Structures are given as C-alpha cells and as structure tokens.
Image (tube, rainbow, N blue to C red):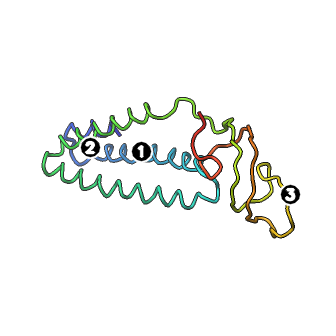
Amino acid sequence: MALAMALGIAKPGFLALLPVWFLIGAGSSLIQTPAGRLLRRSCHAEDRPAIFAAQFALSHVAWLVAYPLAGLAGSALGLVWTFALLGVMVVAATFAAARLWPREDPEVLEHEHAPIEHFHLHVHDEHHRHEHERWEGPEPHRHPHSHGRQRHRHHYVIDMHHQHWPA
C-alpha cells in the first residue's frame, strides 16, 4: 500500500495508474486475508457469524470515512499531496500494528481459573463435570453449577469463562 501511495506521488498518467490500483488491491487483500484468520482465532465457532458481521460493518464504516477523506483531500490539496497524506497514514498504521501486536502470540495458552459459580447453557465436557438431580433435561442444558480451581491449556478466546488474557 505504501509503495502504491509513493507511485501516486509521481503523478502517473492514466495507464501508469493501473499498477497503482493493482498494488492498492493487492495490499487490501494482504490486510483482509490475515484479518479473517485473526477473527476465526478470536472466537468460538458458534460466534463466527456475529464476529464476521461486526467486522464487515466496522470495515465499511472505515471506508465510509476514508473515501470521503481521500476525495476531500484530493480536491483541497491535489492528488500528489493526497497520495503523500495517505502514504503517511499507511506507514503509521503499519508501524503501529508491528509495535502493538505481540511478538509471540500462541493459539494455545496455559492459564488458571479461580473457583466460580455460575449459570449458563452447557454440555458435559472436560470443563463441566458435575452430578445431576435428573431435572436438568437433555444436553445442552442450563442450571447453576460451579467450577473448582483449574489450571490447563487450550485454544484461548475471550468468553464467559475467560474474561481477559492471562498474564
């Protein structure tokens, strides 16, 4: 994307803009493809439709801001300065992402749960082993239950049992 913006500063003619547009499209794909992988990693399978819908909405809000900004800058500053401004924004965003994203980002994390009592829809699995009184009905079912202190490793996402990232 930064290369495309730099090429735009050179005031290319119409035919020379074709590679610039190609680089912008390729850069967008290089951003959006890993974003989809990140979203899949960040939620449970049953939450994916909602998280992808939210990402779709947020990306379109960003476009709703970015396109008019580029158009207003283009008409007020000219295309050379607009390419320069957008290029600075691309480089700043790239540096911010490189700086803010953790260097080591394992999918499976070891962590500890404090004892907890709560009420939610669940099935009996490695996290939900408890006795029943025969009124709960078929799985999945919902009733008050507790979890003792537990230390384990698994694919980690923020959810009801994992309210924040482990230290």
What residue is rendered at 47% in x and 55% in y?
55
Q: Tag 1, which secondary structure?
A: helix
The alpha-carbon separation of the residues under discs 2 and 1 comes to: 16 Å
Residue tagged 2? 16
The front one of 103 and 138 is: 138
Please tell me whether residue 61 is drawn above or below residue 3 in the rendered image.
below
Relative horizontal placement of residue 103, taking residue 160 as reference (left or right): left
The residue tagged 3 is: 131
Q: Secondary structure at mark 3?
A: loop
Q: Which residue is mark 1?
A: 26
Q: Residue drawn 28% across and 54% down?
A: 67
Q: Residues within 10 Å of mark 3 (few under 14, many from 20)?
A: few
Is residue 106 left or right of 145 when viewed as pictured? left
Q: Is residue 44 left or right of residue 80?
A: right
Quarter of the image with the N terminus is: top left
> Considering only vertical position in the picture, is 139 above or below 91?
below
Quadrant showing the C terminus: top right
Nearer-N-terminus badge (3/1): 1
Q: Secondary structure at mark 2?
A: helix
Q: Position of residue 33 (x, y in %)?
A: 50, 47
Residue 122: quadrant of the picture: bottom right
Mark 2: few/some/many CA within 10 Å (<14, 14-19, 20+): few
**Residue 61, how many percent across, how many down?**
36, 57
Q: What amino acid does circle 1 point to?
A: Ala
Q: CA distance from mark 3 to mark 1?
A: 55 Å
Whole-percent x, y for residue 146 in the image = 75, 52
The kind of residue on which mark 2 rests is: Ala
Height in image: 47 above or below 98? below
Q: Nearer the viewer, residue 3 or 81?
A: 81
Query: Is the residue marked by circle 1 packed among few (<14), some (14-19), or many (20+) residues within 10 Å?
Result: some
